[in-house]
C-alpha cells in the first residue's frame, strides 16, 4: 500500500489502453514506432513487449482501432486478474464523489490510496508528470478515438478523454 501520494514504490505499471500485459507496461520498457495490426500479443509481433509511440491521429497503438478491448472481466486483453476488470467512467466518478477533496489529497485519502504516478507520453515514450498527476484508465470509450480516465493533481480531479496510445495506471475492481 502507498505510504504517500508520491510513493514511487507504489506507482506501478503504465498501460496503453487496451493492451495486454506483455512487457510494454514497464515504466521504462523499450519503444517502437511500429503500430500494431493485431491486439493479440506474443505472436512474434515486432511490437511485442515494446511501448508503441504514435504521432498521428487517431493516436492509437493499434490499427484498426478496437473498441471491444478491456470491456468487462472477459474483455480482450483485460489486464486484471481473473474475476476483476477495469472500472467504467461512471464507477470512477462515483469513487471521486466519495473523496474528502476533489484533488490528489482526496485521491490518496480514499481507501484506494491512489498515487501521482504520472503517465508515459505517446510521442517518444517518456515519463511525464510523475509526482504531480495521477491518471487511471476506465474501460469506457469516448468518441471515435479516445477512452476515459480518472485524472487528478494538487488542484483538480475529474473524468477526462485521452488518446489510447498514452500509458496510464490501471486499478482493477472485482466484478
Image (cartoon, rainbow, N blue to C red):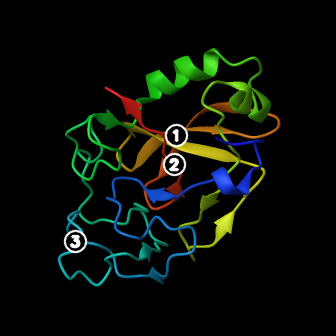
In terms of sequence position, does the residue under pointer 2 or pointer 3 come before the other? 3
For label 3, the residue is 37
* Label 2 SS: strand
Whether residue 13 is situated above or below residue 155 in the rendered picture: below
For label 2, the residue is 162
Residue 43: image quadrant is bottom left
The reply, left or right, for residue 127 in relation to residue 59 is: right
Q: In which quarter of the image is the C terminus?
A: top left
x 60%, y 30%: residue: 112
Q: Give x and y (percent) for residue 17.
A: 40, 53
Whether residue 171 is situated above or below residue 57 in the rendered picture: above
Q: Toward the viewer: 8 or 136?
A: 8
Q: Toward the viewer: 153 or 175?
A: 175
Dot 1 surroundings within 10 Å: few (below 14), some, or many (20 or more)?
Answer: many
Of circles 2 and 1, which is in front? 1
x 45%, y 22%: residue: 90
**Count of numbered tags:** 3
In terms of sequence position, does the residue under pointer 1 or pointer 3 come before the other? 3
Q: Are marks 2 and 1 in contact (CB under 8 Å)?
A: yes
The reply, left or right, for residue 48 in relation to residue 133 is: left
Q: Give x and y (percent) for residue 58.
A: 40, 60
* Label 1 SS: strand
Whether residue 27 is situated above or below residue 11 in the rendered picture: below
In terms of sequence position, does the residue under pointer 2 or pointer 1 come before the other? 1
- The residues tagged by marks 1 and 3 sit, at their Cα atoms, a distance apart of 24 Å
Which residue appears farthest toward the right when viewing the image?
Answer: 154
Q: Give x and y (percent) for residue 68.
A: 22, 44
Whether residue 175 is situated above or below residue 51 in the rendered picture: above
Residue 130: image quadrant is bottom right
Q: Quadrant of the N terminus?
A: top right
For label 1, the residue is 149
* Label 3 SS: loop
Amino acid at each position: 500500500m502507498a505510504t504517500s501520494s508520491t510513493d514511487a514504490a507504489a506507482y506501478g505499471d503504465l498501460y496503453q489502453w487496451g493492451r495486454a500485459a506483455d512487457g510494454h507496461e514497464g515504466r521504462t520498457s523499450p519503444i517502437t514506432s511500429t503500430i500494431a495490426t493485431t491486439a493479440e500479443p506474443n505472436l512474434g509481433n515486432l511490437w511485442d513487449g515494446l511501448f508503441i509511440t504514435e504521432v498521428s491521429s487517431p493516436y492509437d497503438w493499434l490499427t484498426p482501432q478496437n473498441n471491444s478491448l478491456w470491456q468487462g472481466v472477459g474483455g480482450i486483453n483485460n489486464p486484471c486478474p481473473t474475476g476483476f476488470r477495469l472500472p467504467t467512467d461512471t464507477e470512477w466518478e462515483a469513487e471521486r464523489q466519495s473523496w474528502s477533496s476533489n484533488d490528489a489529497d482526496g485521491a490518496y485519502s480514499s481507501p484506494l490510496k491512489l498515487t501521482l504516478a504520472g503517465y508515459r507520453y505517446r510521442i517518444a515514450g517518456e515519463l511525464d508528470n510523475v509526482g504531480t498527476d495521477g491518471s487511471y484508465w476506465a474501460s469506457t470509450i469516448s468518441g471515435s478515438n479516445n477512452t476515459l480516465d480518472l485524472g487528478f493533481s494538487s488542484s483538480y480531479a475529474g473524468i477526462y478523454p485521452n488518446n489510447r496510445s498514452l500509458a496510464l495506471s490501471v486499478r482493477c475492481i472485482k466484478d
